[in-house]
Amino acid sequence: MNPSSIDFYFDFSSPYSYIASEWVEALAARHGRTVSWKAILLGATFQAAGLKSPVEYPIKREYSLHDFERSARFAGVPLKIPDKFPIATQNVARIFWWLHDKRDTTASHWARHALRAYFARGVDLSDVGQLKQLAAEFGLDPDVAERIWSEPAWKARLKAANDSAIAAGVFGAPFFVIDGEPFWGNDRRAQIERWLEKGPF
């Protein structure tokens, strides 16, 4: 029996998702696995779980902002928290699902491109003009991209993805499901590696 893929739930406004996106493919490949990328909106999962982003709590905000950058340095990933953070990411996520459902292998490439643009270059993914420019840079027709994120069908597709994630028990990002086992957070990397090496523990 072939090993199952790693379900990787991420949000384009999540620094930890960005960091995880830089190592998950290589880790999976080392263990003969593939990665099933799943763009979600953290706001939807937070609402379902009765949670808020840690940066919304004054006592957690400064620590969280410090830890985002420290975690990136530890992973060797360039990261600078953008001036506008967090941001709405529904439009960039709808482009992802459009590429995904076309069975286009560039969906995960788009995800990495957009995450790097936001967290390493400060491109505001919530700004229509900047997102269209990013789409063009990636090789997509920017007007087609705008049409896609505005269409009811792709709005519904992203909502369905959020609903499926919530049904699967996802309440944050990054969130991984491997062989039915859930792992929440970029800091679960060592446990994920151990699971893939030797199985359940």
Image (cartoon, rainbow, N blue to C red):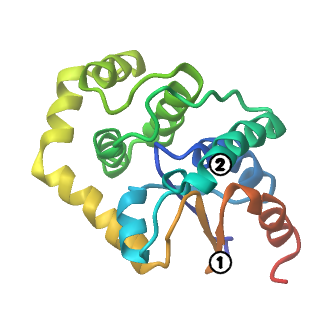
Q: Quadrant of the C terminus?
A: bottom right
* Vertical arrangement, residue 138 with respect to residue 26, above or below: above
- Name the residue carrying label 2: 64
Name the side, left or right, on which 95 lies relative to 17: left
- Give the vertical position of 19 relative to 168 (above or below): above
Name which residue lies at 28% across and 56% down. 158
Which residue is pictured at 24% across the width and 26% down the height? 128
| Secondary structure found at label 2 | helix
Picture quadrant of residue 130: top left
Q: Position of residue 185 (x, y in %)?
A: 66, 61
User: What is the x, y in percent for residue 42?
Assistant: 43, 58
Q: Position of residue 149 (x, y in %)?
A: 21, 40
- 96 vs 18, left or right, is left
Would residue 20 be found to the left or right of residue 73 on screen?
Answer: left
The mark lying in front, picked from 1 and 2, is 2
Which sits in the foreground, 191 or 28?
A: 191
Q: Is residue 109 visible?
A: yes
- Residue located at (77% from left, 58% from top): 189
Q: Residue furthest bottom?
A: 201
Q: Residues within 10 Å of mark 2 (few under 14, many from 20)?
A: some
Q: Residue furthest front?
A: 58
Q: Earlier in the sequence, mark 1 or mark 2?
A: 2
**Which of 140/52 is in front?**
52
Q: Residue at x 65, y 48 (%)?
A: 64
Residue placed most toward the observer, 66 or 24: 66
- Marks 2 and 1: in contact by CB < 8 Å? no
Name the kind of residue labelled 2 in the image: Ser
Disc 1 and disc 2: Cα gap in Å? 30 Å
For mark 1, does the 10 Å Cα neighbourhood hold few (<14), some (14 to 19), or many (20 or more) residues? some
Going by the numbered disc 1, the residue's amino acid type is Asp
Q: Which residue is mark 1?
A: 179
